[in-house]
Image (cartoon, helix red, strand yellow):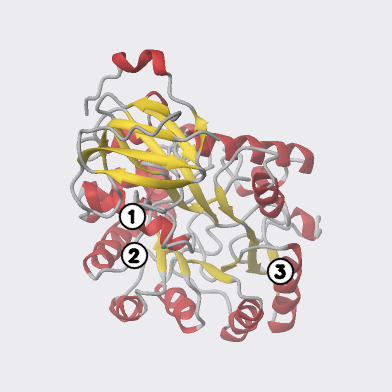
C-alpha cells in the first residue's frame, strides 16, 4: 500500500475548530501527518490527490443503523423477507453506506437473529465492503409491545419482528442467546412507539427486573446495552440500569434530563427525528396521510422531541444523528439529513452538527483516540467533499459531492482524478 497525500484541501478536522488549508499524509491505515499550510507534503512515491480546494473531513458515523430494514413501509414487510435475500440486502446496503460517506455505523437492531453479526464479520474479513460496524441483536420486547408481530392464528416466534420475553428468566435466556451469537450490543424496547398504536410512544412496557436481568448478562460479557426509549419513564429506566445508548428520548421530562446530564460522560442519545418528520409530511404515498399521522400522535411527539432534544443539546448531552433509516419514507443513505434537522430544529450550529457525526462518532464507536478527528496517528477514515458542508449540510447526502471515501487507509470510493478541475467547490 503506497502513501497517499491529499494536498490543496480545506481541512475540517472534526474537533469544532474552523477549517484551514493544508495537506494530509496517509501511511498504511493511519494519518501520518496533517500539514497546516498550503505547502504540500511530498514524500517520494506517494499517490498525490490534488483536492483543488475541496473539503477533507473525517468519515461520518451513523449512530442508529438498521442495515436489514429493507425500505418497506411496515415492520411485517421487513421481517418476512426470506433469510437468503435478507443477507444479500444487508450486504448491498452496507456498501451503500460506505459509499455515502458513513465509515462507521452502530447497529441498532436487526430483523433476524444473526444478520448484524454475519455482516459485521464479513466486513471485518474483507469479504464485502462496508463501514466499521458494531453488531446488534434483534429488538427484545414483551408480548404486545413494539416488535411483537405475532398473530393469534400464527403463533410462531420466527414470524415476530422482535424476540418476545415475559419475565426475567426469559429475558436472561434471550440475551444469552444473542451474546452467544457474538453481538456487540443488546437492544431492549423499553417503551412503545406510535408506529404501533396498541403500544404508543408514551407507554413503558418492561419491568425493572427484566431490564436488570438483561443488563447483568450484558455487563458480564463486557458488551453494551442499547434501548428504544421514547417515554420519559423508559429513559429513566435505561439510565437506572446502566444502558449507554438511548434511542429517541422524545418525551424526556426535567427529571430525565437531569439524569441524562449527570451521566453525560457515559451516555449517548440518537433520536432519529427524521422519521417523525417523515411520518407527518412524507408518508402519504405509503398510506399514512398527515391527518392519520397526527391522529397516531406524531405531531405531539414531534413537538415534545424538539423541546427535549434542544434542552439536551444545551446541557451538553451528546446527541448524535441517526435512526430508523430503511423505511419506505426514510430510505437508506439519506441519513445525513439528520444534520440539517439538528440545525433547523434543535439549535445546533453547522459545526456542532458536523462534530456530532465525527468527534462523537469516534466516541460512540468506542475508539475516541483513533476515530472521528483528522489528527496525526488516527485511523485514516476520510471524506473528500466538493463544497463546504458548513455552508450547506445537504451536500453530504449528494453522491456527486462525495468525491472520495477512504476507510482504514484504502479508497472505498476513489477520486476521479481527471475530473478534478470540474469540481464545483461551491456550497
10 Å neighbourhood of mark 3: few (<14), some, or many (≥20)?
some
Q: Residue furthest front?
A: 44
Examine the rendered structure and indicate whether residue 412 appears above or below residue 179. Answer: above
Count of numbered circles in the view: 3
**Residue 297 can be seen, yes or no:** no
Q: Which residue is mark 1?
A: 356
Q: Residue at x 74, y 82 (%)?
A: 169
**What residue sits 76% from the left and 76% below the top?**
173
- What is the quadrant of residue 403 in the picture? top left
Q: Residues within 10 Å of mark 1 (few under 14, many from 20)?
A: many
Cα–Cα span, label 3 and label 2: 27 Å
Horizontal arrangement in the rendering, residue 173 relative to residue 7 (left or right): right
- Looking at the image, residue 138 lies above or below residue 7: below
Q: In what quadrant of the picture does the N terminus appear?
A: top right
Residue visible at 51% across and 33% down in the picture: 2
Q: Which residue is mark 2?
A: 318
Q: CA distance from mark 2 to mark 1?
A: 7 Å
Q: What is the x, y in percent for residue 280?
A: 37, 44
The disc label shown at residue 84, or none: none
Residue 172: x percent and y percent? 71, 79
387 over 317 or under it: above or below: above
Q: Which residue in the protein does label 3 denote?
A: 179
Residue appearing at x 81%, y 55% in the figure:
154
Position of residue 348 in the picture relative to residue 4 (left or right): left
If you read the primary sequence from the N terminus, does the residue marked by circle 3 or circle 2 appear first?
3
Dot 2 falls on a residue whose secondary structure is loop
Describe the element under mark 1 as helix, strand or loop.
helix
Pointer 2 with pointer 1, Cβ within 8 A: yes
Sequence-wise, which precedes: disc 2 or disc 1?
2
Q: CA distance from mark 3 to mark 1?
A: 29 Å
Amino acid at each position: 500500500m503506497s502513501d497517499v497525500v491529499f494536498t490543496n484541501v480545506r481541512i475540517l478536522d472534526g474537533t469544532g475548530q474552523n477549517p484551514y488549508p493544508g495537506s494530509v499524509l496517509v501511511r498504511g491505515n493511519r494519518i501520518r501527518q496533517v500539514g497546516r499550510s498550503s505547502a504540500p507534503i511530498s514524500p517520494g512515491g506517494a499517490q498525490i490527490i490534488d483536492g483543488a480546494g475541496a473539503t477533507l473531513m473525517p468519515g461520518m458515523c451513523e449512530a442508529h443503523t438498521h442495515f436489514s430494514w429493507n425500505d418497506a413501509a411496515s415492520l411485517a414487510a421487513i421481517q418476512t423477507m426470506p433469510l437468503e435475500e435478507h443477507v444479500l440486502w444487508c450486504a448491498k446496503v452496507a456498501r451503500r453506506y460506505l459509499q455515502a460517506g458513513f465509515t462507521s455505523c452502530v447497529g441498532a437492531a436487526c430483523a433476524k437473529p444473526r444478520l448484524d453479526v454475519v455482516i459485521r464479520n464479513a466486513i471485518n474479513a474483507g469479504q464485502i465492503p462496508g463501514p466499521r460496524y458494531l453488531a446488534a441483536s434483534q429488538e427484545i420486547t414483551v408480548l404486545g409491545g413494539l416488535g411483537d408481530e405475532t398473530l393469534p392464528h400464527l403463533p410462531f416466534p420466527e414470524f415476530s419482528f422482535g424476540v418476545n420475553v415475559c419475565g426475567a428468566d426469559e429475558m436472561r435466556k434471550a440475551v444469552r442467546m444473542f451474546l452467544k451469537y457474538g453481538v456487540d450490543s443488546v437492544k431492549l424496547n423499553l417503551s412503545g412507539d406510535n408506529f404501533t398504536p396498541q403500544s404508543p410512544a408514551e407507554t413503558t412496557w418492561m419491568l425493572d427486573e427484566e431490564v436488570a436481568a438483561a443488563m447483568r448478562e450484558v455487563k458480564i460479557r463486557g458488551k453494551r446495552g442499547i434501548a428504544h426509549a421514547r417515554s420519559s419513564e423508559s429513559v429513566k429506566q435505561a439510565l437506572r440500569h446502566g444502558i449507554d445508548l438511548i434511542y429517541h428520548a422524545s418525551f424526556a421530562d426535567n427529571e430525565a434530563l437531569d439524569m441524562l446530564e449527570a451521566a453525560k460522560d457515559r451516555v449517548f442519545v440518537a433520536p432519529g427525528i427524521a422519521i417523525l418528520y417523515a411520518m407527518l409530511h412524507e408518508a402519504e404515498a405509503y398510506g399514512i396521510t398527515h391527518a392519520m399521522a397526527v391522529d397516531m400522535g406524531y405531531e405531539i411527539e414531534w413537538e415534545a422531541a424538539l423541546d427535549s432534544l434542544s434542552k439536551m443539546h444545551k446541557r451538553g448531552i451528546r446527541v448524535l444523528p441517526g435512526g430508523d433509516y430503511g423505511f419506505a419514507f426514510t430510505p437508506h443513505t439519506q441519513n445525513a439529513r439528520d444534520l440539517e434537522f439538528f440545525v433547523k430544529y434543535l439549535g445546533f450550529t453547522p459545526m456542532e452538527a458536523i462534530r456530532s457525526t465525527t468527534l462523537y462518532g469516534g466516541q460512540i464507536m468506542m475508539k475516541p483516540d483513533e476515530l472521528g478527528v483528522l489528527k496525526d496517528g488516527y485511523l485514516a477514515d476520510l471524506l473528500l467533499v466538493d463544497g463546504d458542508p458548513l455552508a450547506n449540510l445537504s451536500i453530504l447526502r449528494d453522491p456527486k459531492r462525495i468525491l472520495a471515501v477512504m476507510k482504514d487507509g484504502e479508497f472505498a470510493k476513489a477520486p476521479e482524478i481527471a475530473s478534478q478541475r470540474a469540481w464545483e467547490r461551491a456550497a
